[in-house]
Image (cartoon, rainbow, N blue to C red):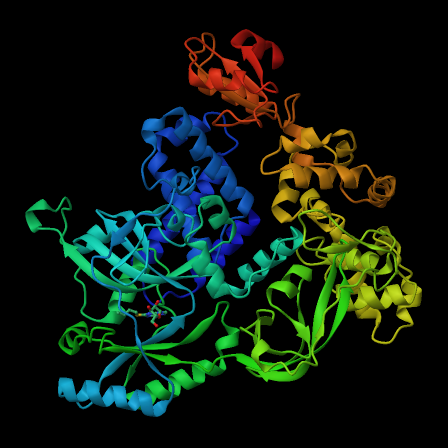
Amino acid sequence: MYFLQSALFIYFTSTFNGLIKYMEQNKQLAEQTLYWLQQLNTNNIEEKAIKNINELKNVLRFNEYQYYVLNNAIISDNEYDALYKLLERIEKKQPELVTKDSPTQRVGSSLNEGFTTVQHLVPMLSLDNSYNADDLKDFDRKAREASKLNEIEYCVEPKFDGASISLIYENDLLVRGATRGDGVEGDDITTNIKQIRSIPLSAPFSKYGIEQIEIRGEVILTKQNFNKYNNWLEEQGLATVANPRNTAAGSLRIKDPKEVARRNLDAFLYHISYMNKYKLQNTKYESEPIALENTHAAQLQMLWNCGFRSPEKEKKIIKGIEGVIKYVLDFEQKRDELPYEIDGMVVKVNSIELQEKLGMTSHHPRWAIAFKFKARQATTKLLNVEYQVGRTGAVTPVAKLQPVAIGGVTVSSISIHNEDYIREKNLKIGDTVLIERAGDVIPQIVKSLPELRTGKEEDIIFLKECPICKSNLFKEEGEAVWRCINIECEAQVVEKIIHFVSKDAMDIKSFGEANVRKFYELGLLKDIPNIYNLNFEKIATLEGFGKKSIDNLKAAIEASKQQPLNRLIYGLGIRFVGETTAKTIANSVEHLLDFKNKSEEDLQQLEDIGVKVAKSIHHFFSNEQNILMLQQLESIGLALKNEKKAIVAGGLTGQTFLFTGTLNKLKRSEAEILAEQQGGIIVSGVSAKLNYLVVGEDAGSKLEKAKKINTIKIISEDEFLKLIE
Ligand code: IVH
């Protein structure tokens, strides 16, 4: 809570270009956020929430906006989740309260069954390209001649490197999202679009008198989310993806909306292609609509004010082409500082009236042009392949390249992932390869160029032995990765420690990869528990370790003892257990060592934990050495207890419940609360993950379905009451 108050303080003391109204509205929402968080633990919270459901929805929308559009969250993920769950609970109790734009309505449970083709309201044109100052001057000259003006005002913004989309809002509601397709028709991808949290499900266009609007934009994947997604793929033993653009584009047409949500896509909206105003007598709004100024920049501002991530902050209004040229060239130098990929800038005539006058060719508008940055691809020679061993024993081949400069960075080695990848990309030692480096994104091989082969190239023959400990490598069926399974293999031990101290795990600042390697090589660090009893006297004798850096290190190590259980679990580096799974499993036990007694079947009952993950967790906790390590960590003072769970947990921890039919003694909502109070989880459908189906009178199809799954316990209301006694 302290965090929230201080964030609010900073938030309100910053200046906001005189947007007083906007600030006042947000101040109110921030205060309401605080209010709802405080109310969470009070008695009749659900009644209050039902009465003020619109306020609760607005609070959730506001916090989504803070997080996904402004990148300025004012509450923690857990606090957001608690408010979201409250809304979910009351909507379940009173389904008539669910509206199409409720924050709960993003989650798509069913799969997309193919995509229907839809027509855009206005064809989606592409942009003409320019590559240098002369091209831009040419574009400006034509525009000046056509408009008979001496100087033109431009609005210049980034050219986002993603996949274009088109959205339609009607009466303030998002009604359709579509891909570009051939420009005239695209695919209806509304369900997938709803997974993108920076796209609002409703927006107050009616304030501007707008009844229907079509907006264009770009779906992108930030560099950070791209790397996160690739790490996850690698952890799962799956093939990694080459760049954020292809991944964003591919994501739009995925069948499973949950998979779309996992990728954490973003969207920039940069163009209004169509607007239809309310006829005045039909307007349901009393006050006059806000007038729309007739410039592109003002339209970006309106989109921003309606809650979209438009390039409002990134755009710049510039008079005359000379200033534009300077600006785009300067921007190119800074492109790596952006958190997402751009492949150029878009120069747009600012006046909408002038845009209309200039019109368009059959391919592109005459009022806008793309300025393309230099490509960051290069060809070079693949000289050799070396192998690295990761913390899970995965052996990764790394191609050594003839050093080549791309976008100001010299690249001399590149991961080539696994044996399948080498085969798919048709790589041989001695090949000429095309490589791409996109910003902070790790360089990738786009393809080999077999047409340039001389016949002297050699096949890449994958190692059969671990390059470090020489034990035999193994490959599991259905996986692409060869592994060293010797858990004492030095390479794995070091990588495990590096992972344990890393930012997303125990976050032991000032430890870092280099220190782990150094201490390990010097024999000062041998395993994870050893982090907590380092010999600082010896470390003090090393170069670069003055009193201050040792004090910092000590303090960081000490502070890490207070990290929550989910971070510790993630830090253990159990295969397939990423940050999300770590949270799920941390919440399912009272004490970490309780996992010793859980079977693979028990683990599979947990949300999002399938056969593979359950097997891996079970394997980890069946290993005596691992248990010993956890006991050591506990005696050192690390928290293996789940504090929250210890308070609320009852006998039903982690068990799933579904109620069907009419209950006699309890209201369904009361029964659900009773189950939850004892640690039970309420689910919405019958599946193999359901533990208890509580059956009231006139139960129907759910009961029939449950009868077919013999692991589900079908009980009466009385039996349920006994269970929770
Ligand atoms: S305006 C009628 N603005 O670039 C004008 N396009 O090569 C519509 N793009 O199809 C386009 N960033 O997918 C515009 N700030 C931006 C853009 C942008 C990326 C994409 C868009 C377009 C392609 C043209």
Name the residue located 51 percent from the left edge and 53 percent from the top edge. 263
Name the residue located 29 percent from the left edge and 51 percent from the top edge. 117
Q: Position of residue 632 (x, y in %)?
A: 87, 44
Residue farthest toward the front in the current orientation of the protein = 455
Instruction: Please say if 428 is above or below 188.
Output: below
Give the tally of numbered discs: 0
The answer to whether residue 247 is visible is yes
Residue 99 is left or right of residue 714, and the answer is left
Instruction: Please say if 320 is above or below 711.
Output: below
Q: Which quadrant of the figure shows ligand 1?
A: bottom left
Q: Position of residue 446 (x, y in %)?
A: 55, 71
Name the residue located 54 percent from the left edge and 61 percent from the top edge. 226
Instruction: Please say if 190 is above or below 419.
Output: above
Quadrant position of residue 437 = bottom right
Quadrant position of residue 649 = top right
Residue 698 is left or right of residue 353, and the answer is right
- Between 97 and 705, which is closer to the camera in this rendering? 705
The answer to whether residue 418 is visible is no
Quadrant position of residue 445 = bottom right
Q: Position of residue 468 (x, y in %)?
A: 86, 63
Q: Position of residue 23 (x, y in %)?
A: 35, 57
Q: Is the C terminus in the top left, top right, bottom left or bottom right quadrant? A: top right
Instruction: Please say if 209 is above or below 468.
Output: above
- Between 390 and 213, which is closer to the camera in this rendering? 390
- Between 423 and 21, which is closer to the camera in this rendering? 423
Name the residue located 49 percent from the left edge and 83 percent from the top edge. 333
